[in-house]
Image: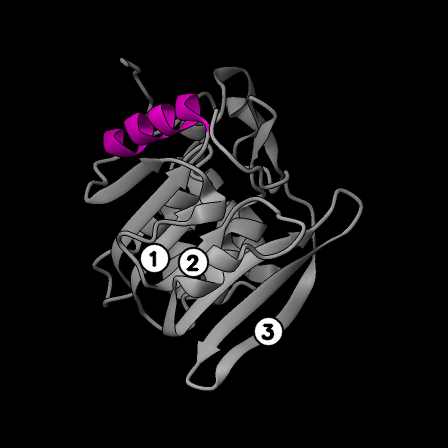
Amino acid sequence: MSERFDLVGIGMTSQRTRNRLVERLREKGINHEAVLSAVGSVPRHIFVDEALAHRAYEDTALPIGQGQTISQPFVVALMTQVLLDVPRTRILEVGTGSGYQTAILASLMGQGGLVDRLFSIERLDGLIDRARVRIDAMGRFGIRYRYGDGYQGWPEVGPFDGILVTAAPPAVPEALIEQLAVGGRLVVPVGGESEQSLMIYDRTADGIVSETLEQVRFVPLVKGVR
């Protein structure tokens, strides 16, 4: 696959545009400076179709084809901030999608030990191919990708200190809970089309502790591959 990207900007897009997005996120409660820096450094416009590039730095979800979306920057930043309450050695992302969330996590690799190893799984082969090309174009390497069923996780390379799910299952897949290391955290939207909650699941030495954050809207997490 051969694609060319404008990594500096497109049209009126500039670093100032990204900085304004960062300030909006800060005003909405994102206070993890490394996460804000990652949002400011990742060129979101290369992860959307060219026709929507002028809207790339709005704080809104956008369609990316195949019934999927690129998540709202605030939600991406919130999930990343919550996941990285402490450094996480091994992180699994379920749902590579456009690759934007992957790129945010990849930008945090090697930064004070926040993220050491990053694994990403996607059930739609067309999406994972495009995401890999775009992230490689940014010079972000060392990510392991897998075309597979996110409901099953990636048991061969687990357990994980952090798992982040970018689509909503009606209930948390048991396989993902099982692949959490002690001290690990799972961040996942849970629910149906009408109501979803962003949830945290922490594995302690005594078992699983859960917490509800806020109401969200994600595409459904679908079993199998396509």
Q: What is the number of callouts on the image? A: 3
x and y percentages locating residue 37 in the rendered image: 37, 55
Give the camera-side residue of 42 and 123.
123
Q: Do the residues under discs 2 and 1 have CB atoms within 8 angstroms? A: yes
**Whether residue 216 is situated above or below residue 208 in the rendered picture:** above
The mark nearer the N terminus, 2 or 1, is 1
- Check disc 3 and report the residue beneath it: 210
SS of the residue under disc 1? strand
Prevalent SS, magenta region: helix
**Whether residue 196 is situated above or below residue 4 in the rendered picture:** below
Q: What residue range appears in magenta?
A: 124-137
The mark nearer the N terminus, 3 or 2, is 2
> Does residue 38 appear in this view?
no
Furthest toward the right, the residue is 194
- Check disc 2 and report the residue beneath it: 163
Direction from residue 150 to residue 140 in the image, left or right = left
